Amino acid sequence: MKPQMLKRLPERHALPTLSIVVPFYNEREVLPACVARLEQVLDTLDLDAELVFVDDGSHDGSADLLAAMQPRRADLRLLRLSRNFGKEAAMSAGLAHARGAAVVVLDADLQDPPELIPDMLAQWRAGADVVQMQRRSRAGESWLKRASAHAFYRLLARLSPAPIPLDTGDFRLMSRRAVDALLRLPERNRYMKGLYAWVGLPTAVLQYDRAARHAGRSKWGYAALAGLALEGITSFSTAPLRLATMAGALTALAGGLYCLWIVAKALLFGDPVAGYPSLVALLALLGGMQLLGIGIVGEYVGKTYLEAKQRPLYLIQDEHLVLAATRMAEW
Ligand code: UDP
Ligand code: MG
């Protein structure tokens, strides 16, 4: 894969109006369809666009496949990360390299229909800095995934200081200033939904039906999703710490009252202190609660540790540019 070096881009094309950022990881089966669909949509739009594909350490030859493609309408830029850093980091890399006045992020697997891009652009032109895409329905996902996603989004909305619209994912359009604001947030743990919410700015919400995956398999098992959920909650809410404190206080209070009752009972009625079972039960309860509390604190301490190391979010191995066929001719 040899990068195509450019001397200078024609002035008029210096900066594209629209960047489409697509993070992907082992998506060989869907990439050709993805590029084709994006091109079809771009054909209907009269603007300069670039496709920023971020290869998140794929090892199925996705990157080579992409580099060999010749898009007609938009320049194709391919960033290869040095390994799999996860979608959140890949997206950050794509956003950092996108140069458009408006940036759309979508999944490679065509679950986020590119045909909605014109509507998103219309909202942006009407003044929205962020156009969030809200899922009206999710096709091709099991009820367990839908139910857990449902519960999680609602829990998050409750815990978050900034409102997070329900059922929105990474599929969205952002204006240049929204992207710049997002890139200025320094944290390493990039729980994007929380970061988007933090940025704020005038936001429009469009509803859409989430399609089933075009081909291939989802990269997210339930364990990974549970991890992401925990990550999300601890990234921008200290509510669990508060919860641990409150649970501790309540248990201590209940324990104290129970102690008084036992002592009083022994003094007044001379009852021998019976109750091995209750002792064991209480011990187990308190031990469990303490471990839970320590675990929650540990989550936050671990976060601080990771942040303190100040490592970069991702490492770019190389960058590859394929000029759009139409532009090659012009040039
Ligand atoms: N993805 C990525 N890095 C990863 C996992 C996933 O860039 O480590 C990409 C993936 O290729 C796809 C998008 O993130 O473009 C969404 O992933 P997937 O479809 O597997 O997730 P789901 O839609 O099931 O939530
Ligand atoms: Mg998907």
Image (cartoon, helix red, strand yellow):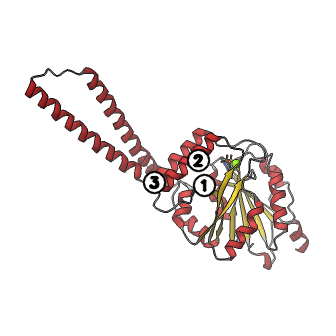
Which residue was labeled with disc 2?
A: 149
Secondary structure type for disc 3: helix
The quadrant in which the C terminus is found is bottom right
Return the disc, 2 or 1, that comes first in the chain's sequence. 2
Q: Residue 276 appears at what percent x and percent y?
A: 25, 20
Alpha-carbon span between mark 2 and mark 1: 8 Å
Which numbered marker is on residue 51? none
Which numbered marker is on residue 308? 3
Determine the residue positioned at 77% across, 69% down. 49
Alpha-carbon span between mark 2 and mark 3: 31 Å
Label 3 neighbourhood size at 10 Å, few (<14), some (14-19), many (20+)?
Answer: few
Most distant residue in the right direction: 329
Q: Nearer the viewer, residue 9 or 287?
A: 287
Between disc 1 and disc 3, the foreground one is 1
When the figure is inspected, residue 155 is found, relative to residue 19, above or below; the finding is above
Q: Nearer the viewer, residue 84 or 320?
A: 84
Q: Residue 200 appears at what percent x and percent y?
A: 54, 68
Residue type at tag 3: Ala
Q: Are marks 1 and 3 in contact (CB under 8 Å)?
A: no
Q: Residue 130 appears at what percent x and percent y?
A: 62, 68
